[in-house]
Image (spheres, helix red, strand yellow):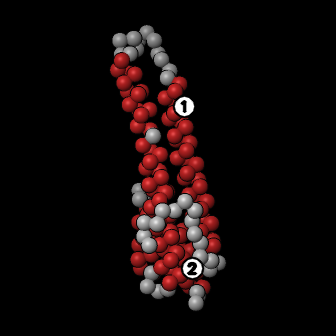
Amino acid sequence: MKTKNDNNNAFLIHISALAGYFFPLGGVIAPLIFWQVKKDESAFLDEQGKEAVNFNLSFLLYQFILGLTFIPFFFRTIFNAFSNIDNMHNNFHFDFPNIFGFFGSASLIGLLAIARLALIILGAIRANNGENYKYPLTIKFIK
């Protein structure tokens, strides 16, 4: 039986992931700490804590993979700069493919951050209403 206290604690577990917008890895560490403290109080808190931690670990992995897409654009820009170092004072070369690739990757990471924010808020509201919320696109690291 879920109580209002359980619903409030589940809300706090979900919403604590917003710490990731202020501290590095805060989006994973804060829900993990809240879940570890509260998981023995009820099955609902245990389930919602696992869901919140799995979701934030999944999105951390997705952001890391998207962040790796910056590497080819970075190295291409560096190598192009060194190959044209003799002509640099005469001919400034603006490299459109690298700029578009960089901003394309950055916009994907930005969209992922916005989607994560919306899903965290949705999960917190649903948990506060006593629903068993399941995040989409979540890898089950903790079962």
If you read the primary sequence from the N terminus, does the residue marked by circle 1 or circle 2 appear first? 2
| Measured Cα–Cα span from mark 1 to mark 2 | 44 Å
- On residue 100, which mark appears? 1
Instruction: Check the image and report above or below for 44 versus 1.
Output: above
Give the quadrant of the N terminus: bottom right
Front: mark 1 or 2: 1
Q: Position of residue 91 (x, y in %)?
A: 45, 12
Q: Residue at x 44, y 61 (%)?
A: 57
Q: Residues within 10 Å of mark 1 (few under 14, many from 20)?
A: few
Q: Along the line of sight, which residue is nearer the eye, 105 or 37?
A: 105
Amino acid type, mark 1:
Phe
Which residue is disc 2 drawn over? Answer: 8
Q: Position of residue 131 (x, y in %)?
A: 62, 77
Evaluate if marks 1 and 2 touch, with contact meaning CB atoms under 8 Å apart: no
Amino acid type, mark 2:
Asn
Secondary-structure class at tag 1: helix
> In the rendered image, which quarter is residue 132 located in?
bottom right
Residue lying farthest to the bottom in this orientation: 1
How many labels sit on residues? 2
Give the side of residue 124 with respect to residue 139, left or right. right
Instruction: Check the image and report above or below for 134 versus 91.
Output: below
